[in-house]
């Protein structure tokens, strides 16, 4: 119980924070005084009705700060009400006084845990004093408590709903950022690896074969331009919240772009079998990214590699992707962002992805995406 009370006492204000004043606030501030004056003019049975109407009009501006200072506004309203009740010896009987419920709602909708406790204490004291002094009957107290409970419940319910929606939006943003991070790593790392390899090849043949060195420079220029374009697109989305470009993403048909046959650099061969037209674009894009990252890892990390084979098979069971290189496999390794990203892509599609030394030598990335993960 103590832990529960401590948790309530230290509870923060509502998240997301309250909005600025909107037109509804000014509409309330304008309408409530008119209602108070109308009620005072028409209800001759209420004693001191003009005095109570004046008090309500004076307190109406508290509505403008009810979101930013909910407990303070509630305390001011009830405090002034208690002073008037003590001075006149009677409780307000104007229906317009019900606008105090807006302040009660605001406390439980926007306030901190301390504000909740303070508001509850004010409401309990107010109801108890009214009942003890005999100004209200037990039925009135029970009815009033019912209205207060309903108001508090609404405030808490809307607070929880808004918080849940904000958490869901944050989760979606986090997933999108993770997706962008994977795309950034996969695409940029692939192009940068190609640039590094071509630079090494160009340096090696520059003295003996100027034409091959020039071809390597052209390849570097092309890869650098593509890298800059993709980085700018992703960074623009991250910084400005712009909508991502709607151009079709790469798929199985674009795997041929991974092929490399430049002199002085490892050969990358691609083989695709099966009916690739039956694969949805989102699945095809994910497979392409896994293949791209597998080739990138082979070119960057494998030692003495001369060939990288990419094989994709589409059949009734799903998709099987293998990326194998003939380099010297490391005796031990720790998964980096690339392998983690490949595994996450496969897992999101209901598949698996593994990476490690092959039995006959070299390194293999194997991914299996079952058709049940996307077929209906």
Image: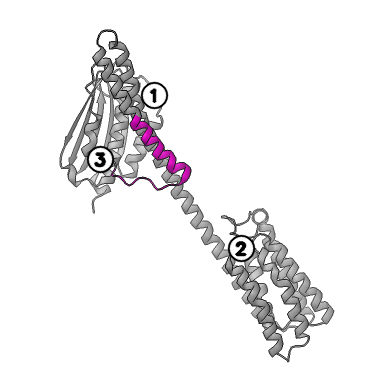
Q: In percent of the image, x 22 and y 39: which residue is there?
A: 252
> How far is mark 2 from mark 3, CA to CA?
49 Å
Are discs 3 and 1 less than 8 Å apart at CB?
A: no
Magenta highlight: main SS: helix
- Find disc 1 in the rendering and name its residue: 333
Query: Where residue 128 sits: x, y (%)?
Result: 75, 75
Dot 2 surroundings within 10 Å: few (below 14), some, or many (20 or more)?
Answer: some
Q: Quadrant of the N terminus?
A: bottom right
The nearer-to-camera label among 2 and 3 is 2
Q: Nearer the viewer, residue 229 or 348?
A: 229
Q: In percent of the image, x 61 and y 72: which residue is there?
A: 27
Residue 162 vs 223, above or below: the answer is below
> How far is mark 3 from mark 1, CA to CA?
30 Å
Query: Where residue 146 sits: x, y (%)?
Result: 62, 76
- Find disc 3 in the rendering and name its residue: 251
The coloring applied to the image is one colour
Report if residue 238 lies within the magenta region. Answer: yes
User: What's the mark number on residue 21?
Assistant: 2
> Secondary structure beneath disc 2?
loop
> How far is mark 2 from mark 1, CA to CA?
57 Å
> Secondary structure beneath disc 1?
loop
From where the camera sits, is residue 276 visible?
A: yes
Instruction: Name the side, left or right, on which 31 lies relative to 351.
Output: right
């Amino acid at each position: 119980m103590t832990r529960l009370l401590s948790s309530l006492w230290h509870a923060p204000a509502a998240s997301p924070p309250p909005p600025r004043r909107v037109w509804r606030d000014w509409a309330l501030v304008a309408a409530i005084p008119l209602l108070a004056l109308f009620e005072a003019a028409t209800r001759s049975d209420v004693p001191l009705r003009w005095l109570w109407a004046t008090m309500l009009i004076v307190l109406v501006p508290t509505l403008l700060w009810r979101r930013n200072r909910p407990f303070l506004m509630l305390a001011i309203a009830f405090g002034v009400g208690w002073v008037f009740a003590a001075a006149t010896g009677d409780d307000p009987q104007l229906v317009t006084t019900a606008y105090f419920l807006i302040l009660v709602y605001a406390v439980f909708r926007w306030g901190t845990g301390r504000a909740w406790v303070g508001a509850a204490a004010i409401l309990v004291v107010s109801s108890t004093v009214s009942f003890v002094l005999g100004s209200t009957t037990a039925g009135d107290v029970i009815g009033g408590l019912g209205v207060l409970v309903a108001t508090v419940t609404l405030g808490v319910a809307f607070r929880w709903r808004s918080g849940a929606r904000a958490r869901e939006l944050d989760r979606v943003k986090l997933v999108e950022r993770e997706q962008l991070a994977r795309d950034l790593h996969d695409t940029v790392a692939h192009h940068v690896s190609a640039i590094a390899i071509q630079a090494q090849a160009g340096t090696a043949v520059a003295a003996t074969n100027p034409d091959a060195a020039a071809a390597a420079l052209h390849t570097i220029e092309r890869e650098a331009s593509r890298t800059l374009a993709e980085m700018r697109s992703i960074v623009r989305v991250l910084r400005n919240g712009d909508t991502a470009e709607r151009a079709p993403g790469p798929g199985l048909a674009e795997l041929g772009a991974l092929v490399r046959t430049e002199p002085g650099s490892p050969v990358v061969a691609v083989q695709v079998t099966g009916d690739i037209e039956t694969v949805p674009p989102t699945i095809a894009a994910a497979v392409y990214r896994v293949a791209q990252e597998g080739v990138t890892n082979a070119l960057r990390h494998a030692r003495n590699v001369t060939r990288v084979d990419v094989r994709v098979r589409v059949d009734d069971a799903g998709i099987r992707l293998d990326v194998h290189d003939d380099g010297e496999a490391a005796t031990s390794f720790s998964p980096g962002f690339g392998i983690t990203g490949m595994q996450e892509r496969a897992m999101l599609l209901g598949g698996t992805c593994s990476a490690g030394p092959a039995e006959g030598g070299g390194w293999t990335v194997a991914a299996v995406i079952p058709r049940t993960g996307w077929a209906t």
